[in-house]
Image: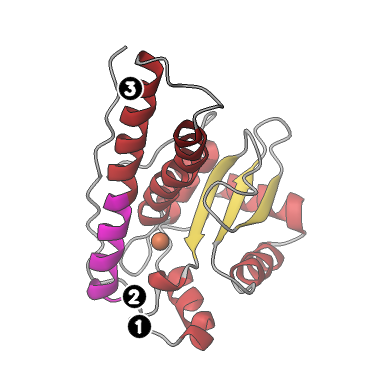
């Protein structure tokens, strides 16, 4: 079986409001690490499979298998995160997205307050707006490690990284709210509208 190799995407985000180019540069390097490790672990697992070492009795197999979800999740979530940002923001929530947020949360403002509250929770993680493709309902989720707490089959619509590396060069850890404010000012609503309107999960274009 031929191995599929992931390639790190390039995102041109220079000039974000309140999120420095230095932070972006460091963050892109972290993202590239997830891509590299996803490829590396996938290759190792295929090799184990070919060599009949893919067995629960092999601790290395179990460890790598468990770890793959973390690396893969880190890669994909960062692509959504960078993909839903644009310098000074872009576009506005579509009429359909606004209606869906109102149906799920009562109002756009109530959704946003909830999204921000999730992103302000103690610990490092992600605040993610997901869409249930069956009911079309939208919900905000706290994802701590990239592979823990992910609602199966749900589609990411808006992804905010609140690991400290996302803002530590620009703000103190206690000033996460300022980073969240900056994130909100840079949302690429054109991209978010696209993810929302797609019938299947769409990986962001670089
Ligand atoms: Fe990150």
Label 1 neighbour load within 10 Å: few <14, some 14-19, many 20+: some
Residue 50 badge? none
Location of residue 15 by image quarter: bottom left
First in sequence: mark 3 vs mark 2: 2
Asked whether 55 or 32 is in front, the reply is 55
In the picture of the structure, the residue carrying the numbered disc 3 is: 47
- In the image, residue 195 above or below residue 30: above
Location of residue 23 by image quarter: bottom left
The x and y percentages for residue 174 are 53, 87
Location of residue 140 by image quarter: bottom right
Residue at coordinates 27% horizontally, 43% vertically from top-left?
A: 36
Q: Quadrant of the C terminus?
A: top left
- Stretch of the chain drawn in magenta: 20-33
Q: Are marks 2 and 1 in contact (CB under 8 Å)?
A: yes
CA distance for labels 3 and 2 = 41 Å
In the picture of the structure, the residue carrying the numbered disc 1 is: 170
In the picture of the structure, the residue carrying the numbered disc 2 is: 19
First in sequence: mark 3 vs mark 1: 3
Q: Is residue 24 magenta?
A: yes
Q: Is residue 134 found left or right of 2 in the rendered image?
A: right
Please tell me whether mark 3 sits on a helix, a strand or a loop: helix
The x and y percentages for residue 112 are 63, 66
Q: Is residue 32 magenta?
A: yes
CA distance for labels 2 and 1 = 7 Å
Q: Is residue 60 found left or right of 99 in the rendered image?
A: left
Q: Is residue 187 found left or right of 147 in the rendered image?
A: left
Point out the frontmost of discs 3 and 1.
Answer: 3
């Amino acid at each position: 079986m031929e191995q599929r190799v992931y390639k790190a995407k390039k995102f041109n985000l220079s000039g974000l409001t309140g999120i420095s180019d230095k932070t972006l540069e460091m963050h892109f390097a972290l993202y590239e690490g997830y891509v590299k490790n996803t490829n590396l672990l996938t290759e190792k697992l295929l090799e184990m499979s070919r060599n009949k070492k893919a067995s629960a009795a092999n601790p290395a197999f179990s460890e790598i298998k468990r770890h793959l979800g973390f690396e893969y999740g880190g890669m994909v979530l960062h692509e959504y995160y960078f993909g839903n940002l644009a310098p000074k923001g872009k576009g506005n929530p579509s009429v359909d997205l606004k209606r869906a947020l109102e149906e799920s949360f009562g109002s756009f403002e109530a959704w946003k307050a909830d999204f921000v509250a999730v992103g302000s929770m103690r610990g490092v993680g992600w605040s993610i707006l997901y869409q249930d493709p069956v009911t079309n309902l939208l919900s905000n989720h706290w994802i701590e490690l990239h592979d823990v707490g992910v609602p199966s089959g749900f589609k990411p619509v808006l992804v905010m990284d609140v690991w400290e590396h996302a803002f530590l060069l620009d703000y103190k850890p206690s000033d996460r709210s300022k980073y969240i404010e900056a994130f909100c000012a840079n949302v690429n609503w054109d991209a978010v509208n696209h993810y929302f309107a797609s019938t299947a999960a769409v990986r962001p274009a670089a």
